[in-house]
Image: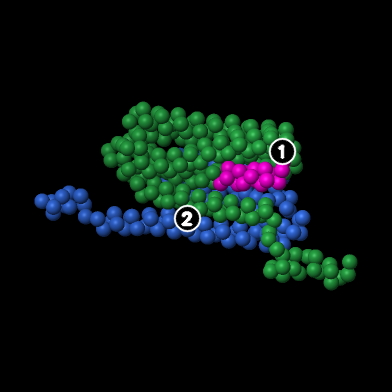
Amino acid sequence: MSTEIEAQGVAPGANVHSHATHRSYLIGLSYAVVLTLASFWASSTDVVYAPGVPILLGVLAIAQMGIHLVFFLHISSAPDQTNNVLALAFGIFVVGLLVFGSMIIMANLNHNMMPMDQLMQMQR
Amino acid sequence: MSAAEQALATADAVPLSRRGPAPKRVVAGYGFWLFLLSDIVIFAALFAAYAVLSGEAAGGPTAAALFDKRHVLIETACLLASSVTCGFGSLAVQSGDRNSTYFWMAITFILGVAFLSLEVSEFSHMLSIGAGPSRSAFLSAFFTLVGTHGLHVTIGLCWLIVMLLQVATLGFQPMVSRRFFCFGLFWHALDIVWIGVFTIVYLGAHL
């Protein structure tokens, strides 16, 4: 059974290599708790240089998503996971395109927009 | 077994064209993984809308005035803990242990309900102070994004009840354990989306 699965790749989260154990979930939990508390702390602290806080929050969030993928969804770089990782990479690509593309386009439009009072005067 | 036969028995020796269809569990898991990624793309569109509109409060309540950080921390704790108990539940399903499946999945269900009731209480409080989705573009985007996540959690809880009924009536057939496996993926993916929600919506509001 196990060679049959390995010949065809594995489903995400499958534990053919028995890395899905109680221990892996507990390791994931402890990392996730630390990262969550760190991001709640970072959002209300004066220790971190204020303009850097959004970047810090982004880094902590992405790190925690990675922890969830590895320890809860058991995504890894193993050769039998290639299909899953490729699909994930495409998903991340589309998400990045959507979010950052929308933000850049809307900020640019906002920047080029005439202030509302001037616009009102032109329409008179 | 001769050396040639042994070489053929390993995965690398069999050409891809002769391996036949993948086991159903792999196909189902991969298909569900693709669904989850497309679901996350939906959330990405809602995140983009929120990121663009979060400042447009139209003179109404702003994000910083509305959101209570401690409330969100409790919600996050509920969802994270339920993710771990769901993982323990999936391990119990894989080993065919009926009692610990019921135990861990019941805890998952209770934590999910706790998360949802916290979210509903937050929403009803916001509606009662006149900060409903029709107040401003910011609030429309907020209710769409967080409400869609809450809707997913609700659907997940209904799915969990159906799965527990199937374990009770059908036992751990391959079909049932495959579905349970997909449920686990769904639940973990919802937790990943929540990381984005609490970082961008709730913590981003106080910057």
What residue is at 35 percent from the left and 37 percent from the top? B133
Q: Amino acid at mark 2?
A: Val
Q: Which residues are magenta?
A: B172-189
Chain letter for the residue marked with disc 1 in the picture: B
Q: Colour of chain A?
A: blue
Q: Residue at x 31, y 58 (%)?
A: A108
Q: Which chain is displayed in green in the rendered image?
A: B
Question: Residue B39, percent across and down?
Answer: 50, 50
State the residue position of label 1.
Answer: B171
Is B156 on the left or on the right of B53, as rendered?
right
Q: Position of residue A124 (x, y in %)?
A: 10, 51
Question: What is the number of the mark on residue A95?
Answer: 2
Q: Is residue A28 above or below residue B14?
A: above
Task: Tell me if label 2 and label 1 are in contact, CB under 8 Å.
Answer: no
Q: Residue furthest bottom?
A: B4
Q: Foreground residue, B110 or A57?
A: B110
- For mark 1, give the secondary structure: loop
